[in-house]
Amino acid sequence: MNKALILDSDLYFIKTLQMFFGRKNIEAIICSDALQAKDLMMNNEFDFIVSSTQLNHKSGLELVSWLKIKSMEKNIPFILITPTNNPEMNASYLDLEPDAIFHKPVDLQDLLTTISNLQLNRPLKVNEPNLSRQS
């Protein structure tokens, strides 16, 4: 079972994602607080992160920047959710180098397809065995 970290200040949105992912056999840990998100990331292993730029108790962009670094260290996909498709803000979002960006409202099936593709196409970790080379 995949395990996801889902972050957004909109409780309805993250509960919707949690139910959707649950039906797809993905355990979704949801969080709306930036401080709690850091603790969750440090103490759990996730297969991917879906994060909004809007979180409680801290600048969403500041946390997103930190999460992106952690996702790169752990070699997991990082998907950014933005409140709107604002061209002025999109440049700052691109500076964060997410693996994908979605604007609200999010098409959940498109999100799941993107996550699956990112997981399939990610490079192997240095210490990760390449199972396809086994005899």
Image (cartoon, rainbow, N blue to C red):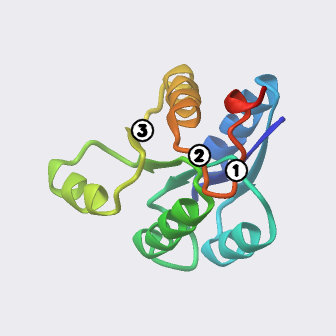
Q: Amino acid at mark 3?
A: Lys
Quadrant for the N terminus in the image: top right
Residue at 15% over, 56% down: 88
Residue at 80% over, 71% down: 43
Residue at 39% over, 49% down: 82
Q: Are marks 2 and 1 in contact (CB under 8 Å)?
A: yes
Residue 49 placement, left or right of 114: right
Disc ID at residue 73: none
Q: Which residue is mark 3?
A: 104
Q: At numbered mark 1, what does the secondary structure look like: helix, strand or loop?
A: loop
Mark 1 and mark 3: Cα distance apart in space = 35 Å
| Residue 29 position within the rendered picture, expressed as x and y whole percent measured from the top left | 77, 52
Q: Amino acid at mark 2?
A: Leu
Q: Amino acid at mark 1?
A: Glu
| Residue 110 position within the rendered picture, expressed as x and y whole percent measured from the top left | 49, 23
Q: Which residue is mark 1?
A: 128
Q: Which residue is mark 2?
A: 124
Which residue is more in the foreground, 127 or 78?
A: 127
Residue 71 placement, left or right of 61: right
Mark 3 nearby-residue class (10 Å; few <14, some 14–19, many ≥20): few
| Residue 57 position within the rendered picture, expressed as x and y whole percent measured from the top left | 57, 79
| Residue 4 position within the rendered picture, expressed as x and y whole percent measured from the top left | 71, 47
Q: Earlier in the sequence, mark 2 or mark 3?
A: 3
Nearer the observer, disc 1 or disc 3? 1
Q: At numbered mark 3, what does the secondary structure look like: helix, strand or loop?
A: loop
Residue at 66% over, 74% down: 38
Mark 2 and mark 1: Cα distance apart in space = 6 Å
Which residue is more in the foreground, 51 or 43?
A: 43
Nearer the observer, disc 2 or disc 3? 2
Residue 87 placement, left or right of 108: left
